[in-house]
């Protein structure tokens, strides 16, 4: 069987040093090899499950201004192949994180209103709402910036307070 690349690098590097030193550095024994493999799997493999679950619980929703960073971090954590939590658990954790969001207030109210068992009372629904809001805000911002630039090129007066004040 093939070992993971980082462990293979550590092992081959040690073997090279042992050969180059002509016996001054001992070769690895079975127990040392096992520790190298366990160390790699703790960081990159199946032992990582507990750390991922803890990260899901401790990640904080930073507010509506930084929801895209939150969504990216959340997506990375839940897509980890070693950490597949049940849908109801992911739903409950994410719902707890998003309840204070002003931008998602209507989506959260709908989520609460429909209740368990409804297709809109799922983790996927909450993620869809989160990404939809992010994309909608980006599109609005880009469209406004484009319109302001086009207006400036055509000689229209500038927006009072700039583009960002018009977005509010």
Image: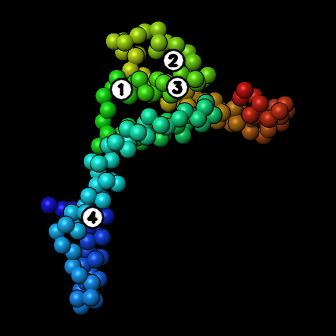
Q: Earlier in the sequence, mark 3 or mark 2?
A: 3
Label 2: few (<14), some (14–19) or many (≥20) C-alpha neighbours in 10 Å: many
Percent from the top left, x then y, of residue 9? 29, 70
Query: How far is the residue under mark 3 from the one under mark 2?
Result: 8 Å
Q: Which residue is mark 1?
A: 89
Query: How far is the residue under mark 4 from the one under mark 1?
Result: 34 Å
Instruction: Tell me the residue at 26%/71% (across/down).
Output: 11
Q: Between tags 3 and 4, which lies in front? A: 4
Percent from the top left, x then y, of residue 156? 82, 33
Left or right: 30, with 49 as reference point: left
Disc marking residue 98: 3
Q: Earlier in the sequence, mark 4 or mark 1?
A: 4
Q: Earlier in the sequence, mark 2 or mark 4?
A: 4
Q: Is there a contact, CB below 8 Å, between mark 3 and mark 2? A: yes
Q: Quadrant of residue 116?
A: top left
Instruction: Tell me the residue at 84%/31% (across/down).
Output: 160
Label 1: few (<14), some (14–19) or many (≥20) C-alpha neighbours in 10 Å: few
Q: Which residue is mark 4?
A: 36
């Amino acid at each position: 069987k093939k070992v993971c690349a980082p462990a293979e690098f550590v092992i081959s590097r040690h073997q090279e040093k042992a050969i180059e030193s002509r016996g001054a550095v001992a070769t690895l024994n079975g127990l040392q090899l096992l520790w190298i493999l366990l160390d790699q799997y703790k960081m990159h493999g199946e032992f990582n499950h507990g750390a991922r679950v803890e990260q899901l619980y401790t990640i904080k929703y930073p507010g509506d201004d930084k929801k895209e960073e939150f969504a990216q971090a959340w997506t990375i954590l839940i897509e980890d192949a070693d950490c597949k939590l049940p849908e109801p658990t992911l739903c409950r954790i994410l719902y707890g994180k998003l309840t204070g969001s002003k931008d998602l207030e209507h989506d959260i109210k709908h989520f609460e209103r429909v209740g368990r068992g409804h297709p809109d009372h799922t983790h996927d629904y909450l993620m869809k709402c989160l990404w939809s809001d992010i994309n909608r805000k980006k599109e609005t911002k880009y469209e406004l910036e484009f319109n302001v630039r086009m207006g400036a090129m055509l000689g229209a007066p500038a927006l009072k307070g700039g583009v960002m004040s018009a977005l509010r």
